[in-house]
Amino acid sequence: MPDTTLDVVADQIFDMVVLPGGLPGADYLNNDPRIHDILTRTQEAGNYTAAICAAPKVLANAGLLEGKQATSYPGILDKMDLPQVDVNLQPVIRDERVITSRGPGTAMDFALELIEVLVGRAKRDEVEAGLVR
């Protein structure tokens, strides 16, 4: 159960907004203008946006991937007409303040990248050490 509704927090500025992947969830996010507004305001504030699996298409449709490198689940970004986006196959890409990841198999690396961005490399290393990779 969520702690609150989107309408209650829609005007807030967040340190980071992370979009979960999967379909049709990414489509629902993409079709909600409130989500695009929150993402745009987050970027304009100099904060982070992140998305995994199918959700990077929401960042693309909000105009947040232009001039950046990004990745997504196969067949999502690479099938869109995005001439200003360098789409590649890396598991996780951080380009300035935008973070994208490919899918379920890259979720742990994505999470570690988010930890590093939010609380630093030392905390990432601490968490990663406990994962016994």
Image (cartoon, rainbow, N blue to C red):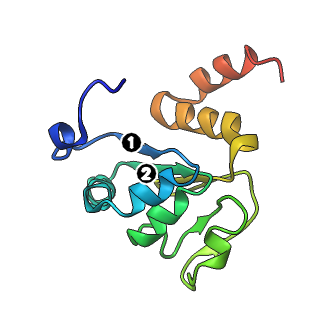
Going by the image, does 85 lie left or right of 32?
right
Residue 50, x across and y down, in percent: 49, 49
Q: Are marks 2 and 1 in contact (CB under 8 Å)?
A: yes
Seen in the picture, residue 7 relative to 38 is either above or below; the reply is: above
In the rendered view, does 7 fall on the left or right side of 87? left
Residue type for callout 1: Met
Which percent across, then down, holds residue 95?
55, 59
The x, y position of residue 12, in whole percent, is 19, 42
Residue that appears at 71% across and 22% down: 128
**Where is mark 1, residue-wise?**
16
Q: Which mark is residue 49?
A: 2
Q: Residue at 29%, 41% (x, y): give it.
A: 14
**Quadrant containing the C terminus in the rendered view:** top right
Task: Please tell me which residue lies in front, 101 or 20.
Answer: 20
Disc 2 and disc 1: Cα gap in Å?
Answer: 6 Å
Please, is residue 59 above or below residue 121 in the view? below
